Structure formats: C-alpha cells, structure tokens
Image: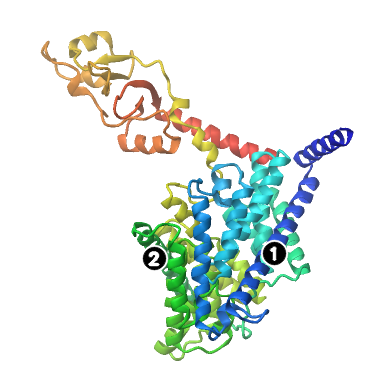
Amino acid sequence: MRLASLLDRALSRGRALVRTTEPALLVVAALIGCLAGVAVTVMSRIAQWLHVVLFAIGRNDFLSATETISSSWRLLATAGGGLVLGVVYLLYRHSQPIVDPIEANALHGGRMSLRDSLRVAFEAVVSNGSGASVGLEAGYTQLGGAMASRIGQRLHLRRADLRTAVGCGAAGAIAAAFSAPLTGAFYSFELIIGVYTVANIAPVMAAAISGFLVAQGLGAAAYTIEVPSTLALHATDYPPYLVLGVLSGLAAIAIMRLVTLVDVAFQTSRLPRAVRPAVGGLVIGAMALYTPQVLAAGHGAMHVNLVQAVPAGLLLTVLLMKIASVAVSLGSGFRGGMFFASLFLGALVGKLFAIGVATIAPTSSIDPAAAAIVAMSALGVGIVGGPLTMTFLALEATGDLAITGIVLAASILSAITVRQLFGYSFSTWRLHLRGETIRSAIDVGWLRGLTVGRMMRTDVRTVLATMPADAFRSLFPLGSTQRVVVTDADGRYAGIVLVAEIHSAPPSSEEETIQPFCRHADKMLFPGMSAQAAAKIFEMAESEELVVVDDATTRQVVGLVTEAHLFRRYAEELDKARRNLAGES
C-alpha cells in the first residue's frame, strides 16, 4: 500500500514537472522518440523476415529488387496475406474507423487508441510482408503517435502539448525509417502538428534524433536513397525541373484518383469485404510474374532504377504496373501508406522525363539522376504533402545543396498544382471520402464545439405572415427594429421582413398582408451547425441576420443569429486558442 502511494506521488510530481518545465517535456519527447525507433526496428525486421520466408530471398536482399521469384507458387503469398487481413476484418467488422495521427490532432486534441493502433501496425506488417504494394510508414507513424498519445494522456498533458507529443511519435518513426532526423521533424511539423513554432521545435527534434539514434543502434535497415553520381546543377537548369514539378503534381492527382476508383470498384462489387484483400493479392501476384518490382513498397526497385541505365520502355512498364499494384493493394483493403511508393513512382517519372527531354532536345543538360530526385520529391509532396519534408529528405539522401533549391521549387509547384486542382493529400482525401472535411492536422476540433446553438439569441419575437401590412406598420414604427421574423399559422418559419422596406412601400389595401415582403424563407440555420457552415449560409443569403430553426421539417423558430456576432465569436475563440497555444508553449 505504501509503495503504491509512493508511485502515485511520483507520478503526480512527474505530471507537474512535465506541465510546467520545458526540460521535463524534452525528456518525455526523447523517450517517445526512442519508443518509436524501437517500433520501427521491430516492424521492419518482421516484414523483412516475412519476405525471406515467403519469397525465398536472401536475408539482406530487397524483395522488389529480385529479378524473379524462385518458385511462381510463392506469389500466392500475397493472397495469403489478404486472407489473414480478411480474418481480422471479420473479427472487427463492427468496430469504428480508426483515428490516425492527422485526424487525432485535427479533431481530437491528440487522443488516439493504442489498441487500435497496434492493430493497424499488425495489418501493415502483414500487408507489406506478404508483398502487397504498400509501405510500412503508415504503421510506423500510427504506432509512434499512439504510444505518444498514451504517454501524454497518462501525464495529463494540455491539449497543445498532447498534439505535440503525437507529432513527436511520428517524427521519431519517420526519422528512424529513413535515417533522416530533419525529414522526420518536418514531417511532424507539416503533416502531423500542422504548424511550425519555436515552442514545438525542441521536443520534435529531440524525438526525431532519439528515434534515429535508437534505430541505428539496433541495426534497423533504413530506407536509403542512393544517387549514382555528383550532380552538377546551375541556375539555367531550373526551367525543365520546374515543369517536372507541375507534371508531378498532375501525376499525383491522377494516382490518387485511380486509387479511389479502384476502391469504389471493390466496394460496389459483390465481393465480401473479408475476401477482397485475397482477390487483390491474386492480382498483384499475377503482375509480379512479369516483374517483382511491383511487390512491397519498392525500396530495392528504387535502387535498381536509380543506379542502372534502364530502357524507357521498361521504365514506363514498371511505372504503370506499380501504379496499378498500389491502386489494387489499397483498393482491395491491404493496410499501408504511399510514402515510399510515391518516392519510387516519382523517381520513375523523373527518369522518363529526362529521357523525353533528351530525345526532343539532344543538347539539353538535364541530368536523369537529378530529374529522378526532383520528381521523387515533387510527386511525394503531391501525394503525401509537406514540401519541406521532401526537400530535407532529398538533402539528407544526397548531401547535395545544389539540388535542394531545385527540389524545393519543384515541390512547391507540385503542392500548388494539387491544392488548386484537387485540394487534398492522400491522407486527407481518404478522410474526405469517409465524410470528414479536414485538409490538414491544424487543430479545428475546438471549432466544432462553436455551434449555432451556442451563439444564437433565444428571445425572438415573431408575427404571422397573415398580418395586414398596415397593422405591421403600426406595431413596428420606423426605428423600433430592423427586422422581424415571420411564421405561418402552424408556427413554421416563413421568412424575415425588413421594417424599412414595408414603410417605404406605397400605401396598400387593408387586405394586403406582409407575406410578399418576406425574405430568406429558404435560408435558415440549425442549432448543431458549425460556425463555418453558418458563415457560408450568411454569404449566400447576403443577410445580416438569419433565423435558427429546430430542423428542416418542422421549421420551428428557436433563435436568431447576426452575422456580426457570428464572426466576432469566431474571432474570439480563434484568438483564445492562439493565446492558449502561446501560453502553454
């Protein structure tokens, strides 16, 4: 009993330290990074072990770099992995959608389920380990973020600090996976936290460096990206690479659209959900008979296509088959991400672009290796997001500052192209298909509590639409009020009457009612409506006040909201959130 009391007191003291002192938070961030590094190491080793066992490759070989699979029947392993996932889907067929780090930070203040995230990690390892064309990065960041969230909740961290902790888990995971601390840190800033501040740089960098060092110490095989030669680039070389950035953005949109179409095709088929991964596995196995480069995320295939001279026809074939295998894998229900797959596809696009430019303009100085790096980063930005993340990945992979500027410029153009023509990264697009409206991890969850019901006035005076216009003028002289809410005989909302408009109208007969003067009868708000949705209706109605009704069927008036009050409350809440963030930092 005494020991339990001491532990409780120690935990309480630890919570107080973390909440009040920055060094204590840095220690927690470093611990989170270490755990993420361990998770990455374990998951990657299990997936590699599955590759060795299921496909009979060497212990240090990459599956996608294999020229042929020794026995064709081994390609049934991908369908077998699909069957395992089908069993998992049957066991959890009634469960709710799993919250990922982006959704957690955007809507739930950084709260994630560790149990659900362990399931995601298991499914990602099974998917990648059985050869499905998906990466482990989604599992890495899911598990890293969930462990961070659990630790943060046990320490009773504030909302802003808990969101930062989730970012630390993701940063440690990506840093460990790519041996790239800066890449991991900016992945967290751009994609998981949604904002870069002086307050969160220290814990995120601490986690990224810790994850990197732990993974290196444990001997984890990082996703290395090798460049075959020193790149000689000059300012005059920018134009073709900028064009490549725009083309990469367009390619990213096409790939995301294709994945969605395949997903819809599987959903509308008569195949049970538990069977779809196995069917997808059969399709992927059939494609792997032609080239194993379609298997797994493509680490080995990336190396082969970067360092070797590959004919354009083969590059194009591998590109199309890899896109198809990614779409089938994700559409059929395999679990994983497109982080590394997008890098691999981008490298293929870049080399094809360089070959095309050299064919059209033989005197061009475009470097195929440089084009591959630029397109790798630009396509990765288009699909995953994060221009600085991909720029630092290129810098840490190549160690070449000359190419970094071109990569950043092309990545920004790719991001602009995707944002203007599509509007989502792959992660937020899949959330959009599920009904969510978030476009980044910026904390908007608190805004969902700012509803019309919280802002409306309930002391609303109404009149009947059958009231004579002369009686209305007598009851509401000029200057008494600006607007009056009108209902029908059943109390249903019928519109708003402008007092000045009735008084300025020509004299009317005694039989004339105020019905013709009613405005905005079809524009109304509802108590559960968010501030953003209400603002859009105000914009469409071009009115300074709108009525709140209980629902669209009964249309009973329950309140009134002015546009000025709506925007004032919104601004106050936004300013309050910013002050809290600054105060907690």
**Type of amino acid under label 1:** Val
- What secondary structure is found at the residue carrying circle 1? helix
Number of residues whose C-alpha sits closer than 10 Å to that of mark 2, classed few (under 14), some (14–19) or many (20 or more): some
**Label 1 sits on residue:** 42
Q: Residue at x 11, y 12 (%)?
A: 511
What is the quadrant of residue 19 in the picture?
Answer: top right
Q: Which callout, 2 or 1, points to the residue nearer the camera?
A: 1
**Quadrant where the N terminus lies?**
top right
Q: Residue at x 52, y 50 (%)?
A: 92
Number of residues whose C-alpha sits closer than 10 Å to that of mark 1, classed few (under 14), some (14–19) or many (20 or more): some
The mark found on residue 28 in the picture is none
**Label 2 sits on residue:** 258
> Where in the figure is residue 543, as x and y percent of width and height?
33, 30
**Type of amino acid under label 2:** Leu
Q: Is residue 132 above or below residue 567?
A: below
**Quadrant where the C terminus lies?**
top right
